[in-house]
Image (cartoon, rainbow, N blue to C red):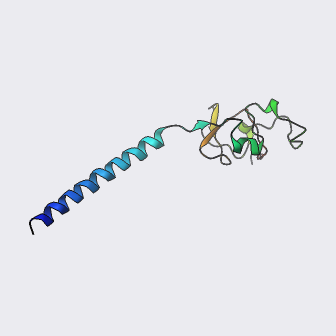
Amino acid sequence: MMNRPIARRALLKTLVVGAAGAALVERTGAASPPARLDEKDPAAVALGYVVHASDVDTKKYPAYVKGQICENCLQLQGTAGDTYRPCSVLPGKLVSVSGWCSAWAAEM
């Protein structure tokens, strides 16, 4: 009988330490900023993303209209004034506010 309470205590201590460690890892991971989207990333290629809208291949993307940039796109998120911001179409990555992709949609 004496072994049971000790084993339970050891289990509880292990669980508490493990939970604290998991919380620390989660907090640390959330604190690191997302990476900038590379034009060669498969998702970027699929959407025709470019860092500078002036580099859009207008033959491949005839819907592009001069003046369309990520900064005036409905999909852009984050804080105004930042050069790279999150995009709802490309989660986990930051896009250039002067960029463009085929998912561009006018702000409402």
Residue 66 horizontal side relative to residue 73, left or right:
right
Residue 48 horizontal side relative to residue 34, left or right:
right
Query: Residue 70 location, x and y as percent?
Result: 73, 38
Viewer-closest of 14 and 98: 14
From the viewer's perspective, is residue 56 above or below residue 2?
above
Q: Is residue 15 visible?
A: yes
Q: Residue at x 87, y 41 (%)?
A: 60
From the viewer's perspective, is residue 38 above or below residue 5?
above
Q: Residue at x 67, y 43 (%)?
A: 76
Q: Quadrant of residue 53?
A: top right
Residue 79 horizontal side relative to residue 8, left or right:
right
Query: Residue 56 location, x and y as percent?
Result: 82, 34
From the viewer's perspective, is residue 6 above or below residue 105?
below
Q: How many marks overall?
A: 0
User: Going by the picture, which residue comes out furthest to the left?
Assistant: 2
Query: Residue 22 location, x and y as percent?
Result: 37, 49
Please identify the quadrant where the N terminus is shown. bottom left
Q: Quadrant of residue 79?
A: top right
Q: Residue at x 12, y 64 (%)?
A: 3
Q: Is residue 80 visible?
A: no
Query: Residue 41 location, x and y as percent?
Result: 68, 40
